[in-house]
Image: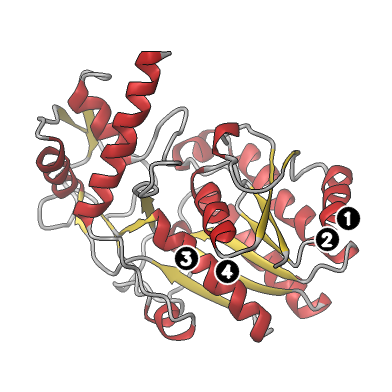
Amino acid sequence: MSNILITGGAGYIGSHVCKMLAKEGYTPITYDNLSNGNREAVQWGPFEEGDILDQDKLLRVLNKYRPSAVMHFAAFAYVGESIINPKKYYRNNVIGTLNVAECMLKQSINNLIFSSSCATFGVPSTMPINETNIQSPINPYGRSKVASEYIIKDFCSAHGLRSVILRYFNAAGADKDLEIGESHSPETHLIPLLFDACVGVTNKFDLYGDDYDTFDGTCIRDYIHVTDLANAHILAYKKLKQDSKTASYNLGNGKGFSVKQVIDMVEKVTGLVVPFIIDSRRVGDPPILIADSSKARVELSWNPVDSSLENIVESAWLWYKKMKERDIKL
C-alpha cells in the first residue's frame, strides 16, 4: 500500500484519519507544526514536524516519502478568533493551501483531499444544505476555506490536480478504542465544554443566545462522529484513484440538535447536571446548519454508522474521563 501525507495529522480529525488509513493498510505520514496538534496523537506512521508555510521543508518531505496523495487538514479553525485576527487565518489557511498545491505540482503529486467546512455556507437560504447551496461565509474562517476551495479548483482546471473537497459539519466524539480523541487548547467545542461545566472544571457553561428562530431558541447543529468523517476520507481517496473528476461533498448526519438538546444528552450520559447561563449571541453564529449528505452517500457509498447523538456523547465522555484520570496520575 502507498504513503499518504496528512497535513495537520496530529490534530483531532487528522489523527483519526491516520488511524483508519493504517487500518486499511496505508502508511500515513503526519506533517504538523504542533501549534494546535498533539504529538501523542501521532501513533500511526512517521512524523515530520513542519509548517505548511515552509515550502522548502514541505518539498523535502514530499520528495522523501513520495506519497500517492495529500490529505490537507492543517488550518486554524476558531471562528471567533478569525474575526479578531483575520490576518492569521488568511496567511495560514489560504497561503498555506496555495503552498501545498504548488509543492504537490512540483513533486508531480496529483491527488488532494481537502478538509473544508460548513462555515463556507454562512447563513443558508435553504435547509438542509446540499452542495448547490450558495457559499456566502459570514466570518474570516469561512472565507478562508472558500478561498482555499477556489485555489484547489483552479489548480485542477489549470494544472491537472485531482481533488475531493469534504465540507464537515460539527465533528464530535472519540475513537471507540480510546486511543485518540478530542484535545484542544483552548477548548471551544460544545461537548467537551459541557463536560468541563458538569464536573466542575469551570463554574458554568455560557450558552450564547436563546432567542434564535429555532424551536427552543438555541442554535441547531448537525453533529457527525469523527470516525464517520475519517471513513469518508478513505472513500474519497479510493474515488480519486478510480475517477479523476474533481468533486465536493457535504458531510453530516442530516439531523440537527439544539444546544439545549445536547445539554440534555450530556446530563443523561454523565448522570451529572450541567450548570449554564444564557449569554448574548456570538457574532458569526448562524441559527441552523444541517447537512444534506445524499451526494456523498450515493457517489462515495458513505454511510455514517456512529453518529447518533447518544453515541457521540458517550464516546466523548469515555475519552474525557480517560484524559482526566491520566491528568490526576500525572
From where the camera sits, is residue 141 visible? Answer: yes
Q: Is residue 28 above or below residue 83?
A: below
Residue in view at x 60 percent, y 40 percent = 42
In the image: residue 113, left or right of residue 154: left
Residue ID for mark 2: 66
Residue ID for mark 4: 165
- The reply to whether the C-beta atoms of the residues labelled 3 and 2 are less than 8 Å apart is no
Residue in view at x 60 percent, y 33 percent = 39
In the image: residue 287, left or right of residue 178: left
Instruction: Report, in whole angstroms, how far the alpha carbon at label 4 lies from the one at label 3.
Output: 14 Å
Going from N to C along the chain, the mark reached first, 4 or 1, is 1
Where residue 147 appears, as percent x and y from the top left, is 63, 60
Q: Secondary structure at mark 3?
A: helix
Quarter of the picture containing the N terminus is: bottom right
Question: Where, by quadrant of the figure, is residue 115 drawn?
Answer: bottom right
Crowd tier of the residue under label 3, counting other residues whose Cα lies within 10 Å: few below 14, some 14–19, many 20 or above:
some
Quarter of the picture containing the C terminus is: top left
Residue in view at x 41 percent, y 54 percent = 226
Where residue 267 appears, as percent x and y from the top left, is 12, 38
Q: Which of label 4 and label 1 is nearer to you? A: 1
In the image: residue 57, left or right of residue 329: right
Crowd tier of the residue under label 4, counting other residues whose Cα lies within 10 Å: few below 14, some 14–19, many 20 or above:
many
Residue closer to the observer: 273 or 47? 47
Give the numbered dot on residue 63.
1
In the image: residue 319, left or right of residue 44: left
- The reply to whether the C-beta atoms of the residues labelled 2 and 1 are less than 8 Å apart is yes
Q: Is residue 180 above or below residue 279?
A: below
Residue ID for mark 3: 231
- The reply to whether the C-beta atoms of the residues labelled 4 and 3 are less than 8 Å apart is no
